[in-house]
Structure formats: C-alpha cells, structure tokens
Image (tube, rainbow, N blue to C red):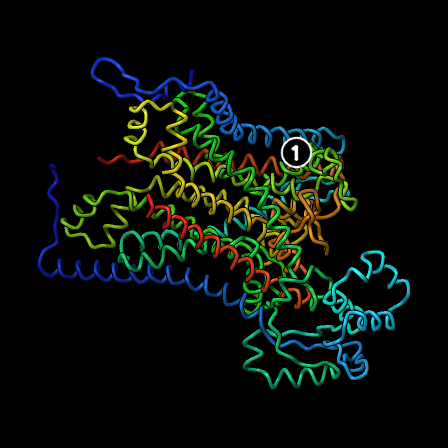
Amino acid sequence: MASEMAMERIVTSEKTINLRRRPRPGEALIQGFLFFCGAVSILTTLGIVYELGKEAWLFFGSPEVSLVDFFTKTRWQPTIGEFGIWPLVTATGMTTVIAMLVALPLGLAVAIYLSEYASARARSVLKPIMEVLAGIPTVVYGYFALTFMTPLLRSIFGRDVVEIYNTASAGLVMGILILPLVASMSEDALSAVPRALREAAYGLGATRFETAVKIVVPAALSGIGAAIIVAVSRAVGETMIVALAAGAGPAFTFNPFKAAETMTGHIVRISGGDLSYDSLDYNSLFAIGLLLFLITLALNIISQRVVRRFREVYE
Amino acid sequence: MSQQLALPEGEALRHNLQRRNRLARIWLVVFQASTIIGIIFLSALLYKVIIQSFGLVAIQNKVDPASLAIEGVPLEEQTREQLTETLRANVSKGLMRRFESEKPFEERTREEVYVLVLERVVEPKIMASWSLPDSLFRRAAIEAEVREKYPEAQLQFRSWLTAEFLRQPQSSKPELAGVRTAILGSLWTILITILVAFPVGVGAAIYLEEYASDNWFNRIIQTNINNLAGVPSIIYGMLGLALFVRGLEPLTSGKLFGTVDPTTANGRTIISAGLTLALLVLPLLIINAQEAIRAVPRSLRQASYGVGATQWQTIWHHVLPNALPGILTGTILSISRAIGETAPLVVVGASTFIALDPTGPFSKFTTLPIQIYQWTARPQAEFRNLAAAAILVLLVLLLSLNATAVLLRNRFSRRL
C-alpha cells in the first residue's frame, strides 16, 4: 500500500515504531478521494493528449490534407484547402525571438542588479513592482501593444514601413511581459549561490562586476538556463498580445513590421468566430494546438533536465 | 602549477585596476538602467490606460433633450410614466411592441426607461474623443477642431469610468456601454472555478504531501503537475471546447437538469468556462498548497500521532489549520490569474454580445477580460476608451484580491 510506506515513522537504530493509530473505516474513503484529486492532473494531461490527438488525427486523415504538405508548404489558407503550417510557425518564431531580445538582456541585468547590487531597501521596492508587472493580465499588454507600442514604432520608422498590425510591436510588448519571469527565476538562481564563493572572489581582489559575471553567473547557469527555456515556452504559447497586435491573417514573411498571424493568434481568431464542429477548419485548429502543445512540453521537459543535469551542488 | 603567473606590477597594475574599475562602473550603470527601463514600461502602461480613461469627447444628440421637456419638467426629472410617453411618441409602434415583449413597461424601473429614452430618442453619439493630456493642454485647438468638423456637437469632459459604467449592461453604443454583464459573468465563472479547483487542488496537495509514497506513479503525478503548469492557457481552452462544450454538452448546456437557456442551447456556458479555468489553475494551486503543507513542522504531526490520532485526524486538526494561511494565499493568487485569463475563454466560446445578466451556471457568458479584448479589437477610438476604463476596473479588482491575500496571510499568521 502506498500509504503504508509514507507513514510517519520514528526511526530508531534497529526498528521502526509507528505511533499512529489505525485508520478509522471512513478514512479509506477520504484517502480514495484524495487519490482521485491527485489523479485529476493525470486525467487532464490524458484529456489534452486524447482530444488534441483525436481531432488532429481526423484532420490529417481527411483527403484534402497531407502530412508532408503540412510541414513543407508555406501557405495557410483553409478556404482554398491549403494547409502549410510554416507561415504560422515563422510568425510565432519572430514574435518569440523579438520578445527574447528584450526579455533576456533586460531580465538578466535586472536579476544581477537585484541579487548582487541592490540594497535590502531597493529590493523591497523592486520585487513588488516585478510582481505587479507579472500579475497584469496579458490582454492588458495586448491593449498596450496596440495603442502605445504600434503608434510609437510607426512614428519612429514611418507609417509606410510599419503596418498597423505587426509582429515587432507584439514581440516587444511580449518581451516586457516575460521580463519579470526571467528576472525572478534568474534572481532565485543567483541568490542560491553560496556567499562563500563571492567572498573568495572579493578576497582575490575581484571587483563586484567581475564577481557577478565570472563567479556567480556561471555558478547559477543551470537555473538561468532553465529560466530562459521557460521564457521561450511562455513566449511561444502567449496569445492575447499577438491576437490583438500581430495581425489577423497568416502571412509568410520575415519582416517584423508586417502583419502576420501566429499559431496561437490563429486559434483564437478562428475559434472566436462562428465555427462549426466537425469541419476541416475545426480539426485544423487542433492540429495546430497539438504542435503547440508538443513544442511547449518539449521546452518544459528540457528545462527540467537542464536544472537537474547541470546543477552545481554546493555544501 | 608549473607555469609562473605573470602578475602586473607598479604602473601596469594601476592601469589595469583603473580599467577594471571603469568597466565595473559602466556595467553597474547598465544594470541599473535595465531595472529603470522595466519600471518605465510599467509606468507607461498604467499612464496609457489612465489617459485613455478620461478626456474630452464631442457629443452630438440626434434630438435635443431640452425639446423633450414635458410642461417644463426636464427629461432627467420626469417620472416613469412621462418617460414612457416620451418614448411612445418618438419611436415606431413595432419597436415599442418589441420592448413590451422583452419586458413589460409596468415591470421596468424608471432608470431602465430613462436609459431607453436616451438610447432610442436622444441618441447621443460620440463623434470624437481625446486623451487626457490632449484635453488638458490642447483644449483650444480641440475646440476649434470640433467647431469646424462637428458644428452641432458639444464638447464635454468625460470620465469613461463612472458608476454608470459599472451599472450598465453591454451596448453597441460606446456612450451607453457598461461592464455590468461582464463583471457578473466574471464573478459567476470564478465562483465555479473556486468551487471545483479549491477542494480538488487542496486534496491533491494533501495526497502528494501526506499520503503518497515515493513510487513511480506518484512521481509521474508530481512531474505531470509541473509540466501542466507550463502548458499554454490556450491549450486548456481547446481541451475545454472539446471536453466540456462538446463532449459533456448535455451536462454543460443544462439539458440534464431541464434548465436550458433558450438563447444558448449549446455547451458554451458559464459552467464550461468555470470548469476550463479550474483545470487551468489546478497545477498552480496544487504547487502552492504543497509548499504550504510542506512548511508545517514534522514535530506537530508526530505529537499528534503520539497522543493516538489517526493520520486523517492529524491532517484535519493539525496540518491543515497550520497550512491554511499559505493555502489561502496561494489560492487567491491562482484565482487572480484565472480572472485575468482571456484566450481559453475565447476558445471555449464566450459570447460576442450579450446585454442580459447571466442568471446561472447555464447562461451564456462574457467576462471582463473578454470585454476588454473585444473593445480593443474594434477600430473606433471610443471603444479604446471603454477598454481603458474596463482595464482600470480589472486592475482594481486584481489589486484588491492580492491585497486581501496579503491581509489574510498576516492575520492568520498572527493568530497561530
């Protein structure tokens, strides 16, 4: 029995004395319910895999779709039966890359500042600000991208160059959204590095900056790496900013000032309209969703592996 | 070490030291600047929302309200009967009949009739709107512009965030639209989310922390929960669409209970939305609750066993009360995430337009973030103003929730 092994024990040198009284009859019932609660998470995962898989299977099974075209063609136009995933993937890639260009340098710099430089007072002001930033709903960031960032970009680069909807604006604001995540995860990793390492570096005459960059950051690299991967996964799955600011039509382009639709943006736009079940459109959403799920799952698993494999353990 | 280290000395040392110190100073500035940039972005975001929520508007009435005065009584002070008469005199018979069939005039309050008169007879229309700084510093230019472009319009200062805004249902006219339906929709949805997610989440946390042994199955559960926390919210929306809206349609549309809302008759209801959000916040809630339970000292459990308590008695009477502040804080934080979620609810099928209050878990729904999304997505500037005001409402709601979490934590931790 699982519970039998988890009993509280007082271990003496030779034998285990269990002080716990035997469960009353009703408690087995309670324990069963608790087990069910734990199993709900497994059921959720199975549900996601089953539902996405089933509809995606129907999608790829239909005569109008071929798996090869799906992964090689660069046009996504369900109305004329063209299903090439690339325009959606490149748009997702572009917003993600732009977001990372903002979030990684800024986030790491903020983390280093908070953990290595900031006084206790500065930290007590800055950390709540970061938490507030992290707690703002993403639809608000979408509003911000559309009404602030896009006009800003258009006034800088010219209205002819920057379209009303563009991936640059969405990506930049997404970077701001992800900044607190990168900063707080990296800061946790940096703070976990033992003081002795820093003291040793100072003792050898290193400056604060040298200590931070050459000693502390390498020592916390696994945690920072994990933060980066989680940030990428978050950017890939981010929806409302791109739905509002990136554009409403798949376009195969690498110009960040042009409108393009990401995978998540496409799912939201199509499912927000009148969607009939069992249509090819409906099934195609689940194929995109499955791809999205697999990408983010892979990123999350890699991040957990990175932490476990490359963690430096200090006494 | 066989190699002799070439250490700089004298002039070279000083030079080297200066260079290193300079580098350190430059980078300190870079780090500080990055932090400040982050704060600037947050301020810009709040600033943008606030300046859009207040400002000048040019309003043009189709019928001058002064001409609707009856025997010298202005429109604002008329009784319900007088208002009904005004309405009858100014709209077609067919429209009157439609109002009557929607809700008889005898049952309508004065306020409701007044709003109808405004909406159908006076028909104020916002021709243009300006942001707060423009309204304050460019007033003269704006007045000139209004005189030229909209000679019949009146310029007035308008706060988009008013008590009316909170009380009015959704409307296709920006000057009359409010967030009442959206707020009620959000509250209903969150209520269902809490009712499902809280017991299941805490139950799962208790199981994992107190009962589960270290075998492969329980390790899978734990890994799985960590992975689920990283799944994009839109995927949960798709699960909700396939599972709750389609798969469990008889249940979620209310057919099984015989309470089908005639206007929906499908599973795109509040209960589907609430269940979807419950699945979404579960991983977060479980992880938070686990941490709270783990923080309860082992000695407490052993003392309880020592006086002969069973495992469940120990958990119920000692572990849970001690972990409660932490669990509640974690729950409120998870719930505030659910309140702000938009994407999964769009996928599950929030209604694009409903002006009637939700009446129960089987009603069609819209929520505050979805309202913001729809208003933002419209090209007219007035709807952007509405979106900004709705964002302020949402942010205030979230902030007060978080403040409650902090207060709860402080209060409980003092008592224990």
**Residue at (15, 52) in percent of width and height:** A205
Q: Quadrant of the C terminus of chain A?
A: top left
**Residue at (66, 68) in percent of width and height:** B382
Measured as percent of width and height from the top left, residue B182 is found at 64, 55
Element under disc 1? helix
Q: Quadrant of the N terminus of chain A?
A: top left
**Numbered disc 1: what chain?**
B
Quadrant of the rendered image containing residue B214: top left
Tell me: residue B83, above or below residue A271. Answer: below
Measured as percent of width and height from the top left, residue B329 is found at 43, 46
Tell me: residue A202, above or below residue B223. Answer: below
Name the residue nearer the viewer: A12 or B353: A12
Q: Is residue A35 left or right of residue B182?
A: left
Measured as percent of width and height from the top left, residue A55 is found at 68, 32
**Residue at (35, 24) in percent of width and height:** B309
Residue tagged by mark 1? B243
Name the residue at the right extreme: B93
| Amino acid type at image mark 1 | Leu
**Residue at (59, 39) in percent of width and height:** B236
Name the residue nearer the viewer: B313 or B45: B313
Name the residue nearer the viewer: B178 or B324: B324
Name the residue at the left extreme: B10
Q: How many marks?
A: 1
Q: Is residue B96 left or right of residue B163?
A: right
Measured as percent of width and height from the top left, residue B86 is found at 83, 73
Residue A75 appears in the rendering: no
Quadrant of the rendered image containing residue B68: bottom right
Density class for disc 1 (Cα within 10 Å; few <14, some 14-19, many ≥20) is some
Quadrant of the rendered image containing residue B296: top left
Residue B299 appears in the rendering: yes
